[in-house]
Amino acid sequence: MSNYIYSVGMSGLTGQVIRVEATVREDKEQCIIIGLPDASIKESKERILNCLHALKKDIDMKKITIHLSPADVKKQGTSYDAAMLLAVLQAMTKKPFDIPDKTCFIAALTLNGELTTFHSMIPTIHQAILLGFKRIYIPPIEISLFAQAADVDLIRMPDMPSLLSHLSGKPSLFDEDLTLLAPEIVYEDHERVPHVCFSAIRGHDEAKRALLLAAAGGHHVLMSGPPGCGKSLLANAFHTILPDLAHDEMLEVYSIYQLAKQARSLSERPPFRSPHHSSSEGAIIGGGRYPKPGEMSLAHRGVLFLDELGHFPRRVIDTLRQPLESGFAVVNRVEGSDQFPAAINLIAATNPCPCGYYGSLEKYCTCGDKARLKYMQKITGPIIDRVDFVLEMKNQGVLAQPTAVTSEELRKLTASARTCQRIRYGANYTNAIVPIKLFEEKTHFSTAQLARIETVSFQEKLSSRATMKILRLARTISDVAGDDQVTDTAVDEALEWKISASHTHSSLMR
């Protein structure tokens, strides 16, 4: 049995065990909470005192001290309310409750002792399960989300008298027919954002192949071309060929939206985010006094579409570097540093110059060389190095061309490829972001294939990162084809894509 009361706090999207203890002694009536609490936790003392009055506990001439441990970690939110009140009651009674190990309490309180929800409740419960707690006391919310956690008891209690009765082993006052509180879930149609089926897009066969491979392996795409050539249309269609989210992915994405206090339905479809080019660095990567997820994390397991990339500030574009490679966005602030997941497909689109018609056969470009280079130099070499496909788009006479396969058919291919990757790596990694050591352990190339890649990389003056991108892309091409081993054909195609990306970027910078 534990001598402490345990709760769970959040640091970014990572849960942390919080140990709560309290002392009550004869002194001037006072309630103090220590352990680096934020303003919302400091206000908890008023809720705790009111709940003690509601429970008819004598607190005259009592000094109550509540300690949240670890003491050197900043804490925020109201998820500790029930645990703090229970710790005080434990300190006041002569016969403390026998609380089993691996038990935690996650609930906010009303003034009369009712257990209620808080905005990050779903991710907090999810993290409590991941931290190994086997009995979790929570408010009376819908818990079907956690049905797969079969070895965990989620005990729903409406108020403190019911919870105390349950801990005492007495019949609980809780009625199973009690109307459940809404856990801040927004059920809405996930197709409310309009997307285009691939069958409606004619031509652009090269771009469609690149998008298929990007969706299958989590790779990134940059499209450059004059206005109206189909960049935005292809980007909006890309979302429709991504596979559905697995249950753990859906819960992870929903948790991010709860932390950011943004509406998101419990949808199996991946998120699609398209921030305006006036967005700040903090809006894209995340920020705030207490860091919150930005657009990159809100697009986790889905698409981040940056239209008019050349209009984004260079500083904002450069913040994409680390998350594109690692799959995580790190936000550092004076108040703390947090890491948010950001495993995304970046789809970026830009015009080749401010007027948009550089290299076009339809209209003359009115931009000077200096203005055009300044426009394109925002997209730096390190960003291009992290992008797998750089496509130079042209206007096409699409009306006479046949329609393409449907998004549903392409989605089956990407879903199959993603399944292969999850089985191969034993974790939810895509080929684009799997750690290099694990990638090398699970993916094998022949001596001839490695020699060919090394020779071409030397001839084209490709960086080590670009060479590694070729290996990852070749693995994705083989996954889409259903091949267990990386084929020579896949290596050749990967080399063609990377050489093409290098040449296209060079031509845009001239």
Image: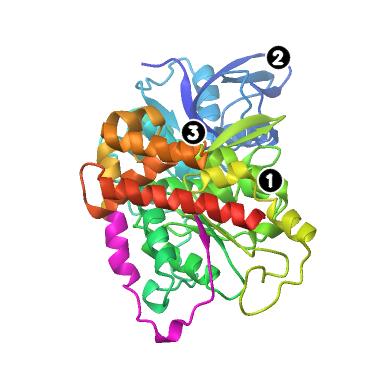
Q: Which residue is mark 1?
A: 282
Label 3: element kind: helix
Is residue 123 found inside the magenta-colored segment of the image? Answer: no
User: Which residue: 32% across, 62% down?
Assistant: 411
Q: Which part of the image, by quadrant, shows the C terminus?
A: bottom right
Taking the view exactly as shown, the residue that stands out farthest to the bottom is 400
Closer to the N terminus: mark 3 or mark 2? Answer: 2
Q: Which part of the image, by quadrant, shows the N terminus?
A: top left
| One can see residue 175 in this view | no
Q: Which mark is residue 191?
A: none
Q: Which residue is mark 3?
A: 464
**Three-letter amino acid code at the position of disc 3:** Ser
Is residue 414 found inside the magenta-colored segment of the image? Answer: yes
Q: Which residues are magenta?
A: 390-415
User: Which residue: 66% across, 50% down?
Assistant: 283
Label 1: element kind: helix
| Cβ atoms under marks 2 and 1 closer than 8 Å | no
Closer to the N terminus: mark 2 or mark 1? Answer: 2
Name the one closer to the observer, 115 or 429. 429
